Amino acid sequence: MSKLNNSNIKLAVQKSGRLTEETLKFLKLAGLEFETYKKRLFSFCRNYPLEIVYARDDDIPYYVTRGSVDLGIVGQNLLYEQKRKTKKLLDLSFGFCSLLVAVPKESKIRKVEDLQGLNIATSYSNSTNKFFKKRKIKVNLVEISGSVEATPALGISQAIVDLVSTGSTLALNDLRILEKIYDSQAVLIANPKSTKNLKKKKLINQLITRFKGILAAKEFKYIMLNAPEKILPQLKKLLPGLKSPTISPLGEKGWISVQAVVEEGVFWETIEKLKKLGTQGILVLPVEKMIL
């Protein structure tokens, strides 16, 4: 086994699970070159002083707190649950899920207050206890390390609290959502001491710049189109881009070529307005990275 280099920054990621595939894809979008294999414990970046440590997701906050690694990518839910002394640096906009209270579909329970005195099965005992305590509802927590969806059918609990991404698992087990406790997504966390070390701080900030470039690009589409020159004032209002659209004359008199960046949230609405104005040949391109 190769020995880790103490002068490099170390990033812990989930070895196998819900966040693994998207995390590795995100790191490679950031331009990091490394090899991954299922049984690999470490990866060494070829083009950046970074070493990737593959670990159980539950262990990552502990590794970061202890200083065994400088950074970690985990679900926000683990930070809520474990309350480790880590510093959150960035929301990563993937791995979205929610911690939900659910009951069997045929249950007469209609609100969380109806769970008073009943058994709740969960793997997230701290978050669940805090939620019910805040609502002043006394329940009996049943801690389950594996799948909690089966516990109502087995007579172990009358409700569950579990992390849900799509809701398909709940549906397959004839469960319905009663209430949401919180939302979660993948986040970048750091050991506070690492962010104060001058050398490591510089490397971490450079890495964050790369990550922010990917996140910013997700929010925009790059479009190119042809338009009558006479509608230029309307186009400037509709397509401000980052500052203003790029405009070039075409060979055909009275026509121009326009290039602009459009926010993802209003993309289709903007396209419809452009078509009504008389634009033609609208070409849409994804934005891979954007450094603001």
Image (cartoon, grey):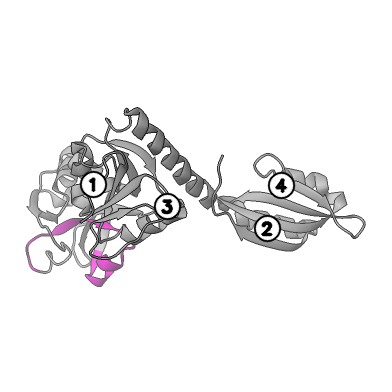
- Name the kind of residue labelled 4 in the image: Leu
Q: For the residue labelled by badge 3, is the local secondary structure a helix, a strand or a loop?
A: loop
Q: Residues within 10 Å of mark 3 (few under 14, many from 20)?
A: many
Could you tell me which secondary element the residue under label 1 belongs to?
helix
Q: Which mark is residue 32?
A: 3
Q: Which residue is mark 4?
A: 238
Is 153 above or below relative to 192? Answer: below
Q: Position of residue 92 (x, y in %)?
A: 40, 47
Q: Is residue 289 left or right of residue 157?
A: right
Q: Is residue 291 left or right of residue 109?
A: right
Mark 3 and 1 residues: CB-CB less than 8 Å, in contact? Answer: no
Q: Quadrant of residue 170?
A: bottom left
- The structure residue drawn at horizontal position 12% and vertical position 48%, both measured from the top left corner, is 116
Q: Earlier in the sequence, mark 2 or mark 3?
A: 3
The magenta region covers 154-175
Distance from Cα at disc 4 to Cα at disc 1: 42 Å
Left or right of 9, for residue 126 = left
Q: CA distance from mark 2 to mark 3?
A: 35 Å
Residue receiving disc 2: 271
Place of residue 233 in the rendered image (x, y in percent of width and height, measured from the top left): 81, 44
On the question of residue 117 being in view, the answer is no
Q: In the depicted view, which residue is nearer to us: 192 or 227?
A: 192
Residue depicted at x 37% and y 52%: 45
In terms of sequence position, does the residue under pointer 2 or pointer 4 come before the other? Answer: 4
Callouts 4 and 3 close, C-beta under 8 Å: no
Residue tagged by mark 1? 78
Q: N-terminal of the two: label 4 or label 1?
A: 1
Q: Residues within 10 Å of mark 4 (few under 14, many from 20)?
A: some
